[in-house]
Amino acid sequence: MDTEAPRDEPIRFNRARRKVYVYRFRHNGLKPFSRSAWGARPEVYDWDNLHAEACSIYGAMGSGGSTQTVTLAVLEPGTHKVVDRFHFAHDIQQGEMYWAMAQLFMQQGPQALPSFPRPPRDWNNEKIRFNLARRLAPKVHWPEAIDLESRSAPSMHG
């Protein structure tokens, strides 16, 4: 049972399959000894059922207690009923930018994206010097079948 949050919670967008793969850490403080209430689990969602939402989160913070984030809501197909949500960005501007890039990629493909000055970051290979929590956090490990599916197009053989 994994009770530690992983180093990252990556999201993969697969245009060919129209799927979104989310590596999520779930925890439930009310069920501290339940195997089903804790751990990193990949989730697979249909792109057409996702909707971006701006959220205000209140908590004890030095800046007054409120922060704005963006989550992605998973809708029941053909409705506006939310069946799940997951974190997408830490602030509204970042979320708007990331959501616009995700939409552009899913609609037009990678050639439509802007060029980026730095290569993509893989937190599993990041050198961690001073942050003990990140150093001890488990690396992201996608199950083999989902790793393959999230990186490939559907087979033409059915």
Image (cartoon, rainbow, N blue to C red):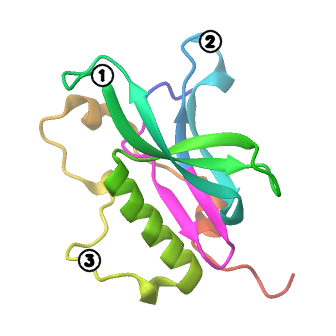
Q: Magenta part of the protein: which range?
A: 6-22
Disc 3: which residue: 116
Q: Which of the two labelled residues, at mark 2 and mark 3, occupies the earlier sequence position?
A: 2
Disc 2: which residue: 31
Q: Residues within 10 Å of mark 1 (few under 14, many from 20)?
A: few
Q: Residues within 10 Å of mark 2 (few under 14, many from 20)?
A: few
15 drawn magenta: yes
Mark 1 vs mark 3: give the one in front.
Answer: 1
State the residue at coordinates (54%, 24%).
27
Counting from the top left corner in percent of width and height, residue 102 is at: 49, 69
For this rendering, which residue is in front, 24 or 93? 93
Q: Which mark is residue 65?
A: 1
Rounded to the nearest angstrom, the CA distance separating label 1 from label 3 is 34 Å
Inspect the image, locate mark 1, and give the three-letter code of the amino acid beneath it.
Answer: Gly
Instruction: Find numbered disc 3 in the image and state the secondary structure of the residue it sits on.
Output: loop
State the residue at coordinates (45%, 53%).
10
Instruction: Find numbered disc 1 in the image and state the secondary structure of the residue it sits on.
Output: loop
For this rendering, which residue is in front, 22 or 55? 55
Left or right relative to 77: residue 152? left
Rounded to the nearest angstrom, the CA distance separating label 1 from label 2 is 27 Å
Q: Which of the two labelled residues, at mark 1 and mark 2, occupies the earlier sequence position?
A: 2
Mark 2 vs mark 3: give the one in front.
Answer: 3
Q: Residues within 10 Å of mark 3 (few under 14, many from 20)?
A: few
Task: Identify the image quadrant of residue 61.
Answer: top left
